Structures are given as C-alpha cells and as structure tokens.
Image (spheres, rainbow, N blue to C red):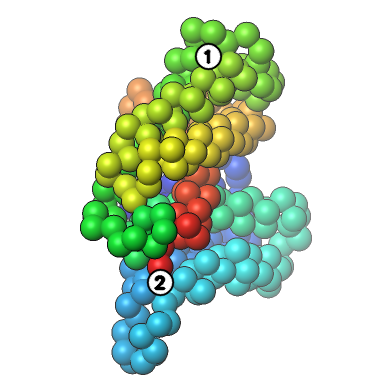
Amino acid sequence: MFPFWALREFITMTPTRRGDHRTLFWVFFIFTPLQYILIGLGSSPPSWITSDPNRDFYDFYSIMIPVYASLFIPARAAIAGDYKRFLERSAKIQSGLLICVYSLSYAPALLDLDLVQTGKIPWGGSNVSLLVFFVLIAQLASVFERAWGKLAGRKVIAEKINASRTWEGFLGSMVTTGLVAAALSWATPFHPWEAWILGAVVTVMACAGTMTMSAIKRDRGVTDTGTLVQGHAGLLDQIDTICFAAPVFYHLTRFFWSV
C-alpha cells in the first residue's frame, strides 16, 4: 500500500505523456509487487525454485529495480514512439521507482535478517522490534531537527530548497536521535554505543531525504507531495526519511549484525 501510494504521489507531481502509460503499468503492477514478493520469500525460497538451503533472494531484490527495471523503463518508453522530453520522463519514472519502491522495500527486508550481536553472539530478540526501532528513530530524526532548528537554528543549509532546515538543527538532531537510539538499544541487537552511531547515521540520511524531496517540490512548484488526508502533507512527505535511511540502515545491519 505505502509504496504504491508514495510512487503515485511522486509521479503525479510532474506531468506524463500518453507514451508513458504502458511503462507506468509495468512499474506499478509488475516491478513494484515483484520487489515485495522477492523480499517476502526472502531467505526461504520455495523448493520448486531452488533446493539450495543457503540460497536466498537478496541477490535478486537488491538488483532487480536498479539494474533490470532501470534498463527496461527507457526501452519501453522508446518503443512507445514518443521522443519529446524523453530523457526527463524516463529519469523521473526511474527516480520514483528507486526512491518510493526500491529504497522503501529495505524496511520490511529487515524482518528477514538472521541477527546476531557483536562477536556473532546469537540474539534472541524479534526482528519486528528492530523494524519498529528503525522507523521510530527515522521519524524522530526529522522531529528533532525541526525542534533544534527552531531553538538554536542560525545557519540555513540551503535556503532556496528548505528555509527551515539548519545546520544547528541537523547537528542537534544527530546527537538527540543517537541518545534516543542508545536508550532503546535493548530492543535491538546493538550495544548502546552502536545504536547511537546508527541513530546518527539515520539522521544524516533522514535529512538527505527531506532535502531531496524539498528540492523536487520546489522544482515542481508544489508545497506537498499529495493530499492523502485533508489538512496534512502527502504520504511521501511523511516517509521520505524512511525511504532514504532504509537501505543504509539495512546494509549496515546486514554487514555487521547478521549471519
């Protein structure tokens, strides 16, 4: 649900042409569900696909969209025969699929990791608690950044992109989010100091997501990505931090805290 709606908001921010419609059909109804099916199968592929107990679908879902879908999109658009603004249209669809579907998919992919603590000590906790931990600190990073920006903000990061985001708010959020992450380390396989570092990393990526989406909205002349709930910003406005932080958090966790 979330990736479909987020991608819809992304695509509707910029106009499409008739030649894009069949490409978008593949993007919404083939590549998007296929990405999440592969993640759902995860490390337990059906026996009719492979009998190798050590084989998982990470090799497939980690490259399916950035490689195969990214090659397919411009090729399918070219077959439609519409060359006007071809590069811009193809790049927009590729970017939307990469940010709203592929990057976001690494959040549920956390559920499939076989987690251990530092030193390869088995961890008896639940992957669900790790997912909740990640989503919470990704959202808190944005909240703390705005709060610190109002309290101590002086130097704006990029005024023409987002005048409310400051370096002081960013640094304050890194520290505060890290402390919250350390306090919640009991719900994760991380030691408190490890959780603090990951909290700071998530803050960096959350800020990157917010600034990137702000730049896109300024370019398109809109204030919100959508109107899912009247009086509130669009769904993509709410989860842009998660979209950008999820792949980095997943790969750090996979590399250092999984079997």
The amino acid type, in three-letter code, at marker 2 is Leu
Q: Position of residue 10 (x, y in %)?
A: 52, 44
Instruction: State the CA–CA distance, disc 1 to disc 2.
Output: 40 Å
- Front residue of 78/107: it is 107
Total labels: the figure holds 2
SS class, disc 2: helix
Q: Which residue is mark 2?
A: 38
The amino acid type, in three-letter code, at marker 1 is Gly
Q: Is residue 105 visible?
A: no
Vertically, is 188 above or below 149?
below
- Front residue of 230/149: it is 149
* Residue at (40% x, 68% y) in the render: 259
Mark on residue 101? none
Q: Quadrant of residue 157?
A: top right
- Front residue of 122/84: it is 122
Q: Position of residue 84 (x, y in %)?
A: 75, 55
Q: Position of residue 226 (x, y in %)?
A: 44, 35
Q: Is residue 5 visible?
A: yes
Q: Which residue is mark 1?
A: 149
